[in-house]
Amino acid sequence: MPLNDTAILPTENSNRDFERLYIALREREQRLYTDEQVIQLPNIDPSHLHYNEWKIRKHSAERLINYLNKKKRALYILEIGCGNGWLSAQLSEIKGANVIGQDINRVEIDQAKRVFKKSNLEFFCEEFDAERFKYMYFDVIIFAASVQYFPSLKQILNRALSCLSVVGEIHLLDTNFYNQANIDSTIQRTLVYYTKMGCPELAAYYFHHRLDDLKGFDHKILANPNTIMNRLQKSNPFYWISIKKK
């Protein structure tokens, strides 16, 4: 399954309102980085506002890459919602890997294209559409801190599964999952936060998925932040979940 021009040509983005709000928020949160900073990610100066967050992202990335390295075979990888491309670039260091990073955010995709130039790494800017990949099957599809921007977890996972090889895996990283008891209060806190940041409209684009939404999928929790050991270590507050075809 070669990476080819047909698979990565950008199309007109239908999500400009979201992109405008998202970029405005990231700028206010100090989450837009210079090219020099992006190329070093997930490493960042300890004085940076989001240093502790990047320690977590680095831990997640290393854990995933170690897992994938053990497969000891060529892997075709798709990262959906890749942002500035730092994780896709890390994944492209895996021996035999070919990586595609996709996002609807043109500002950060343009930065990814500018910063990361490798023969086995491609970026494109458009909404994820399984039809684009109907002749391509990925061994690994990754949602890292991105699945919350899709309104239906079941729908986006089924769409991704249709692009997965027979022995492929979807990986969900750096994403909160909720239960019915706390989801309403969390939705309210999200609205309060976005309102405080001057982007209340963005709350309509952020979706709070539950672990129960994974029922019916062949999934495995590879890391659970709620175990006693993880709570003591406080190394990573997020679930790591893999999903396979049935």
Image (tube, helix red, strand yellow):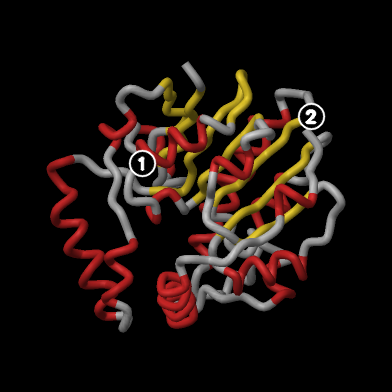
* Screen quadrant of the N terminus: top right
Labels 1, 2: front one: 1
Few, some or many C-alpha atoms within 10 Å of disc 1 (few <14, some 14-19, many ≥20)?
some
Q: Nearer the viewer, residue 220 or 153?
A: 153
Q: Residue furthest right?
A: 119
Q: Nearer the viewer, residue 111 or 9?
A: 9
Compared with 84, 246 (above or below) is above
Which x, y percent locates residue 178?
Answer: 26, 44
Q: CA distance from mark 1 to mark 2?
A: 28 Å
Q: Which residue is pictured at 66% across the width and 31% down the height? A: 137
Residue 188: mark? none
Which x, y percent locates residue 159?
Answer: 47, 37
Q: Would residue 128 appear left or right of 124 to someone viewing this image? A: left
Q: Amino acid at mark 1?
A: Leu
Q: Which residue is pictured at 28% across the width and 74% down the height? A: 201
Which x, y percent locates residue 75?
Answer: 73, 32
Q: Which residue is pictured at 28% across the width and 65% down the height? A: 204
Q: Callout 1: helix, strand or loop?
A: helix
Q: Nearer the viewer, residue 244 or 176?
A: 244
Disc with the residue nearer the chain's start (1 vs 2): 2
Residue 153: mark? 1
Q: Which residue is pictured at 72% across the width and 75% down the height? A: 35
Q: Give the image quarter of residue 163.
A: top right
Q: Give the image quarter of residue 197.
A: bottom left
Q: Residue furthest top?
A: 246
Q: Callout 2: helix, strand or loop?
A: loop
Few, some or many C-alpha atoms within 10 Å of disc 2 (few <14, some 14-19, many ≥20)?
some
Q: Amino acid at mark 2?
A: Ala
Which x, y percent locates residue 143?
Answer: 51, 45
Compared with 98, 214 (above or below) is above
Q: Which residue is mark 2?
A: 74
Are discs 1 and 2 less than 8 Å apart at CB? no
